């Protein structure tokens, strides 16, 4: 675990606890937005079998308790006005009647439910289900995961009293309350976003009853305090208020200050996403974007992609092992040494299948247009361009859904590369602003907590608290190249679906390594 302290403005602080896929980070923020202290603790994402991506929920709970305690020790328990939570979406965990885990945490990255998702997506009511729940029918969703469990592990399902996600498990341990906020619930595929209630048809598909799910509450709900055990573990008074909070995607918009109409948040970390805040639930007729709750009267619409920084990591391992363990800077320099369009080379970057806008576990990565004249720089650049083009398809889908996107604020590891930053602006064909100095979802959780606890009037202050460090404008010539390539890139997915289907059928006979 790592910890970091900072300044000491007077007044109360709120702890934003961000439960991520690979680590939990707790950050203390003053009401003015100043970051005072932080601590993080990692845990493994295990892949014991193909398609499995699971975690031990107890390790995640321990990381929450440890990081909160570390930050409390830095700022002082007497200054902590409350805790507020963010967590990764789409996780599923089976609990005993006593609230003990009977399954690992099945994460968003788990693709076991691919067959169930394809079957449901192709059914007569598949698209209508997406429109009602806001969640694409995809293996990531708890709905399809539950279908898999009931088909593959029926005896285990008989022992499970409750189904929940990681934040619900943590809050159960901290506060002895089994609740789920509307934001996390809107990403399960089980909640009707128009009625803010569990969807009867979705529950029928999942094979569960409403009483097997946590109680639905607003993201601004405040739990009265901590259990005696969790108070001791965190060093906080048992009376400390706990704000249930929301999911990490919507809170990232809040943490970037992208909460006003027309201002989108874009992130490229391991994966990527593009999202905009709206005042009512919106899902486009073709079901290409998600719609998740943020606060009462605010919804986040957009799309996530599976393949962001992971594509650059693959390029380092597969194309440039000679560059060492941290080749990112040199890889981006290679990409910058060749022109936009990579000499007619395109890459579909579907190394981990894909989410928006196709929402399918079927596709794989592909280079198209490869010639003898292409070198390593072209291969790397085409990979990065593919990530940006995929986000371009998400932006196109959002606009097709009637959403206005006038500004984009970006964050994530990709922003360390001037080449990749400019490439994103050129591919999206719009100005990209880079926010300075905040913790994204963790800061969003803290702001939501401040509003819930009456410390700020509204989360609208985020627009003023988050400054813009720099803004990049598209290079007209390169932007024109990418605009001409986007329809070609878009057509490639459909053109290769028969190939992807054949390869999946043949996959069992095509091992990666010799036995």
Image (tube, helix red, strand yellow):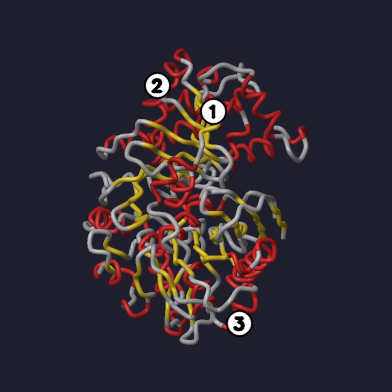
Q: Secondary structure at mark 2?
A: helix
Q: Earlier in the sequence, mark 3 or mark 1?
A: 3
Find the distance from the CA under tag 2 to the CA under tag 3: 57 Å
Instruction: Count neighbours of disc 3 (C-alpha within 10 A) and say few if under 14, some if 14 to 19, many if 20 or more.
Output: few
2 or 3: mark nearer the eye: 3
32 vs 3, nearest the viewer: 32
Looking at the image, which residue is at 52% across and 25% down? Answer: 423
Find the distance from the CA under tag 3 to the CA under tag 1: 46 Å
Looking at the image, which residue is at 63% across and 72% down? Answer: 234
Tag 2–tag 3 contact (CB < 8 Å): no
Q: Which residue is mark 1?
A: 470
Looking at the image, which residue is at 59% across and 66% down? Answer: 55
Q: Is residue 142 left or right of residue 131?
A: right
Q: Is residue 399 left or right of residue 163?
A: left
Instruction: Count neighbours of disc 2 (C-alpha within 10 A) and say few if under 14, some if 14 to 19, many if 20 or more.
Output: some
In percent of width and height, residue 508 lies at 54, 55
* Residue 154 figure quarter: bottom left
142 vs 261, nearest the viewer: 261
* Residue 203 figure quarter: bottom left
């Amino acid at each position: 675990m790592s910890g970091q302290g900072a300044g000491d403005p007077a007044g109360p602080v709120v702890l934003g606890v961000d439960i991520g896929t690979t680590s939990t980070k707790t950050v203390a923020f003053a009401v003015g937005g100043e970051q005072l202290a932080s601590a993080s603790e990692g845990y493994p994402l295990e892949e014991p079998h193909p398609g499995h991506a699971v975690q031990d929920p107890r390790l995640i709970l321990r990381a929450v308790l440890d990081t909160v305690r570390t930050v409390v020790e830095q700022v002082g328990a007497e200054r902590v006005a409350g805790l507020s939570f963010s967590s990764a979406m789409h996780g599923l965990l089976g609990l005993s009647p006593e609230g003990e885990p009977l399954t690992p945490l099945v994460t968003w990255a788990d693709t076991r439910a691919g067959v169930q998702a394809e079957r449901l997506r192709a059914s007569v009511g598949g698209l209508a289900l997406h429109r009602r729940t806001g969640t694409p029918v995809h293996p990531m969703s708890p709905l399809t995961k539950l279908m898999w469990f009931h088909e593959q592990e029926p005896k285990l399902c008989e022992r499970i009293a409750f189904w929940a996600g990681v934040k619900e498990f943590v809050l159960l341990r901290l506060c002895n309350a089994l609740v789920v906020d509307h934001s996390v619930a809107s990403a399960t595929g089980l909640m009707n976003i128009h009625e803010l209630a569990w969807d009867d048809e979705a529950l029928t598909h999942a094979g569960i009853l409403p009483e097997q799910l946590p109680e639905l509450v607003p993201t601004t709900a405040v739990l009265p305090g901590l259990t005696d055990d969790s108070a001791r573990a965190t060093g906080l008074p048992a009376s400390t208020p706990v704000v249930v909070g929301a999911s990490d995607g919507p809170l990232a918009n809040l943490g970037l200050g992208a909460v006003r109409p027309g201002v989108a948040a874009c992130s490229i970390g391991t994966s990527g996403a593009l999202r905009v805040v709206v005042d009512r639930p919106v899902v486009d007729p073709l079901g290409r974007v998600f719609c998740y709750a943020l606060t009462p009267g605010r919804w986040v619409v957009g799309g996530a992609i599976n393949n962001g920084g992971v594509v650059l990591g693959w390029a380092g391992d597969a194309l440039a092992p000679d560059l060492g363990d941290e080749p990112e800077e040199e890889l981006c320099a290679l990409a910058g040494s060749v022109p936009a369009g990579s000499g007619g080379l395109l890459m579909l970057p579907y190394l981990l299948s894909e989410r928006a806008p196709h929402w399918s576990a079927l596709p794989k990565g592909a280079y198209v247009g490869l010639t003898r004249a292409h070198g390593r720089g072209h291969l790397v650049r085409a990979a990065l361009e593919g990530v940006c083009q995929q986000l371009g398809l998400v932006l196109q889908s959002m606009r097709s859904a009637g959403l206005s996107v006038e500004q984009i604020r970006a964050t994530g590891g990709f922003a360390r590369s001037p080449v990749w930053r400019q490439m994103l602006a050129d591919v999206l064909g719009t100005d990209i602003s880079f926010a300075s100095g905040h913790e994204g979802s963790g800061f969003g959780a803290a702001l939501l907590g401040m509003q819930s606890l009456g410390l700020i009037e509204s989360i609208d202050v985020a627009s003023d608290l988050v400054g813009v460090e720099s803004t990049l404008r598209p290079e007209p010539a390169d932007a024109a190249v990418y605009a001409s390539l986007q329809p070609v890139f878009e057509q490639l997915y459909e053109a290769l679906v028969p190939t992807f289907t054949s390869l999946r059928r043949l996959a069992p006979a095509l091992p990666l390594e010799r036995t």
